[in-house]
Image: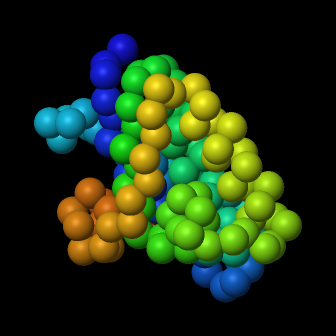
Amino acid sequence: MIDEVRLFTDGASRGNPGPAAVCYRALTTDGDVLVEHAECIGRATNNQAEYRALLLGLVACRSLTTGRVRCELDSQIVVSQLTGQFRTKNAELLALRNAVRDAANAFADVSYRQRPRSLPDIARADALANQALDACTA
């Protein structure tokens, strides 16, 4: 187990809702990849896919740390809802937000930060989510 993990996540949807895929990447603070995963999740909205990517990533981090997880994603809405800046009005997103908060309880500290898609680690997660989406819609 390590003290801190940087978790990069992304969700993608073609149509809103439509076929969707997710990706999470867990890295050390030095940038070494601990785990990288992408998969199709069926039909979802983009925001649902973003939440599901984060949830799956947090679950994967349980085998890596009980310490700190720094979550970095490009979804302003998800970060704003998780940090309490925005209310979560949609019932499906509320259930996913609550599931993320429950998953976060496994760690000493979890933070959420919105990052631009141009950041290389976010861009990689985006590319992997879209590759998975291409595979499941082919």
Which image quarter: residue 43? Answer: bottom right
Identity of the residue drawn at 74% across and 65% down = 93
The answer to whether residue 63 of the structure is visible from this angle is: yes
Tell which of 35 and 81 is nearer to you: 81
- Asked if 73 appears above or below 85 in the picture, the reply is above
Identity of the residue drawn at 29% across and 38% down = 27
Which image quarter: residue 25? Answer: top left
- Asked if 28 appears above or below 71 in the picture, the reply is above
Q: Residue pushed farthest top? A: 1
Residue 14 at x, y percent in the picture: 61, 80
Tell me if 42 is positioned left or right of 12 in this view.
right
Tell me if 29 is positioned left or right of 107 in this view.
left
Identity of the residue drawn at 32% across and 62% down = 122
Residue 82 at x, y percent in the picture: 58, 58
Tell me if 75 is positioned left or right of 46 in this view.
left
Quadrant in the picture for the N terminus: top left
Residue 33 at x, y percent in the picture: 26, 37
Residue 110 at x, y percent in the picture: 46, 40
The number of callouts visible is 0
